[in-house]
Amino acid sequence: MVLFALMIAMLLAMLDNMIVGTAMPTIVGELGGLEHLSWVVTAYTLATAASTPIWGKLGDMYGRKGVFLTSIVLFLIGSALSGMAQDMGQLIGFRAVQGLGAGGLMVGVMAIIGDLIPPRERGKYQGMMAGVMAVAMIGGPLVGGTITDHLGWRWSFYINLPLGAIALIMVTAVLHLPKKRSQTRIDYVGAALLTIGITSLVLITTWGGTEYDWLSGQIIGLGILGVVALVAFVLVERKVSEPVLPLHIFRNGNFSLVTLIGFLVGFVMFGSMTFLPLFQQTVQGASATNSGLLLLPMLLAMMVVSLFAGRVTTQTGKYKIFVVVGGACITVGLALLSLMDTDTTRFTSGVYMAVLGAGMGFLMQTTMLIAQNSVEMKDMGVGSSSATLFRTIGGSFGVAIFGAIFTNQVQSTMVERIGKAGEKMTSGGAQMDPKGLAKLPPMIRDAYDHAVATGTHHVFLWGAAVSIIGFAAAWFLKEVPLRGGPAKPAESLEGGDAPVDRVAVAETV
């Protein structure tokens, strides 16, 4: 029952991303222009990244249940406000509030599961997590598309409210954890410095080459601010008694490698989930509802592979092979998606997406499993939040960088094909939603289709290049035994060098 309640809360966070992602072209078309596409996502992911380590540390210090419930409430407030937004500025701000709550949702679920279930046994329950992902990723685009087509995009945010109410009631009723009370103050200085550093770097990737030149004073200033903030953050974390992100956890080689891999997974995953619906609705002529259904090959492949990897990990304790194969599949899948153009059929793009989904299925839960197995139980919260943080930062960087690449390619292609008229259509807040595109003259519509296809080609090509780094990093992971594996009483009692299971000893006493 506890796990079921946690899965509902996890569904709450994941469903929102899927629903909003499908509705994004319509939202941007009504409230602003194409250049705002990445900001609606970036504001959410930035707030999630900044708050994730704080939520994890608060859970370690004061107990997970109260902190977890608070994050749910904050997420619901942000959802309600986002649905009432009247312009793009308001929507971006309210999405940031929603992102603050989302940071606590995901890390709360992962940390609580990490407390309750040892890593070796977690593969049995990976099917539940994969099932939640499948419901969110398959049902989310479908629900989001249906809501957008029939009720309007605002209901893509309001739909969170009844689901959130169920999550609050269930978690309150069935989750019983010991209360904690720490006298140590949380590291707010470190959290502020980390937030400034992350925000500066993401703004560089968002504005560089689009809003400002790469060598402009604004971009150089942001770069200096980001570097100074991150250096100061490291110095602060080395001195405070309770750092918001303890640096000692990165001394573990597996933890450092798996956070790098998680960063890259977030980088390519957020990018693909943002730009695939745009390609499908614009180039392939799908409605918002159908674009959700067209993502099924990727999402089903992710679910099936995640189930398989979880079962094998529980039975054998082996996991490195899944990270290696997952990195290879993601690289190949992105390379295949970069081949799409205006003539690509839905079947062909579905096959490409299935390859990418298989790679995500191998990596999504396995990377978190390795991260939690690499830290001590007392650091479960910060370990889970750090892994989540780097995946979120990767997503933020991915959307920002891919957004800049996509926008530049669309604008340059439109100018190349139809001159200055093309530049006016894709800059300055021009509204280019799918319904408006259907009314364009055939020549202009054809030019825009080619522009979007060119933009997505470059996005996925760069994504494939980045994912090669993750594939290479996977080979350096060490197959460290998972905690909670089969006990060997004879060796534990008679062998002087056998490791002692301190948790089991404490429970026996």
Image (spheres, rainbow, N blue to C red):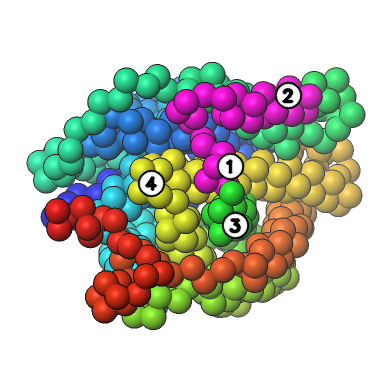
Q: From the image, which quarter does the N terminus lie in?
A: bottom left
Q: Judge by depth and name the residue closer to the eye, 449 or 243.
A: 243
Q: Amino acid at mark 4?
A: Met
State the mark number for residue 253. Answer: 3
Residue 393 visible? The answer is yes
State the mark number for residue 380. Answer: 4
| Number of marks drawn | 4
Q: Amino acid at mark 1?
A: Ile
Name the N-terminal-most of marks 4 and 1. 4
Name the N-terminal-most of marks 1 and 2. 2
The picture quadrant where one finds residue 328 is bottom right
Left or right of 237? Residue 23 is left
Q: Amino acid at mark 2?
A: Val
Q: Residues within 10 Å of mark 3 (few under 14, many from 20)?
A: few
Task: Give the residue pinned by disc 1.
Answer: 393
Of the two numbered discs 1 and 2 in the rendering, the one whose residue sits closer to the viewer: 2
Name the N-terminal-most of marks 3 and 4. 3
Task: Give the residue pinned by disc 2.
Answer: 228
Of the two numbered discs 1 and 3 in the rendering, the one whose residue sits closer to the viewer: 3
Q: Main secondary structure of the magenta part?
A: helix
Q: Residues within 10 Å of mark 2 (few under 14, many from 20)?
A: some
Name the N-terminal-most of marks 3 and 2. 2
Which SS class for mark 1?
Answer: helix
Magenta-colored span: 223-250
Cα distance, mark 3 to mark 4? Answer: 17 Å
Q: Judge by depth and name the residue closer to the eye, 341 or 268.
A: 268
Name the N-terminal-most of marks 1 and 3. 3
Cα distance, mark 4 to mark 1? Answer: 20 Å
